[in-house]
Image (tube, grey):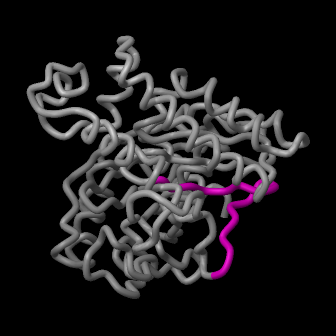
Amino acid sequence: MNKIALAFDLGGTELRAALVDDGGKLLAFASVPTRARDGPNAVIEQIAMLAEKTCSEVPDANPLGVGIGAPGPLDPVLGILTAPPTLSGWREVPLARLLQERLKLPVRLENDANAAALGEWRFGAGRGAASLVFVTVSTGIGGGVISDGRIMHGRRGLAGEIGHMTITSEGERCLCGAVGCFEAVASGTALGRRATALTKPGDGSALRTLSDDGEVTGRHVVEAARAGDEAALALIEREARWLGIGFTNLLHLYSPDMIVMGGGISHGHDLLRDRIEATMRERAMPAYRDVPVVPAQLARHAGLIGAASLIFLS
């Protein structure tokens, strides 16, 4: 039997678990709503329950350890969740130690975006590359950097917060408090906000029809653009330009072999690609212009597969 590891993806709303083998295959999967508001001990009990459930589905399961991807900021060396905004009230929680005591297995903790980057590098779109930047474009913008085959952690594991690099001096204020963050202008939330401002409830537009006259989301924009709606296509054009500007910065900062784009907005990669690439050719120095932007392949399981890989590579 292949080596296997327990993997967890700890989110503010959902806790996901899997048994993963060293070929990147999910052998068992389960998820529950995260009891984040009830504190770390309640979530640790949820993790223990999911560990038992997933292991029961695989005869003779004997995981080597536990890998967990969690929202940052966190310290992957000390295994401490510092103060993640999506886990209200969690401050300086030694999650790796607490889980190791509860599950009696070695535990590795990693930023969830870094875990997804590792998953895509080992088993997804980045397989065979020496370096890549993984960018998730969804509610916000997150990322992870693989450089020369290793996760780039930086001081206290805080590297790769690419959503908060400043790319303009204008626009909506970011949730972090700054103006002009990549996330504030190019996330799925920002795309949906522009679409909502452009339309009105009951106006008969494709965007409002898809949203049932509610708030328009980035996914609605992608869906309408795919159907040929002119307003949605214009929004996609603007979105792609912002992404191209941000991606150009990543080329100059990290010089990766590729940029891997994940998250909900990546489902519109084919619609975004031409303008992203044109913007990067326009703005990047010549030596960087041949770096491709490719869609992620592992979808929502990238983080679980990457979390398991923390155990296989340790």
Residue lying farthest bottom? 92
Magenta segment main secondary structure: strand
Residue 2, magenta (yes or no): no
Residue lying farthest top? 228
Question: Is residue 39 positioned above or below 273 on the image?
Answer: below
Where residue 133 appears, as percent x and y from the top left, is 67, 49
Visible in this render: residue 250?
yes
Question: Is residue 68 positioned above or below 136 on the image?
Answer: below
Span shown in magenta: 141-155
Question: Is residue 68 positioned above or below 178 on the image?
Answer: above
Residue 150, magenta (yes or no): yes
Residue lying farthest left? 202
From the viewer's side, name the closer residue of 28 and 205: 205
Total numbered circles: 0
Where residue 54 appears, as percent x and y from the top left, is 32, 48
From the viewer's side, name the closer residue of 87 and 31: 87
Q: Quadrant of the N terminus?
A: top right
Q: Residue at x 61, y 63 (%)?
A: 160
From the viewer's side, name the closer residue of 186 and 314: 186
Q: Residue at x 67, y 34 (%)?
A: 293
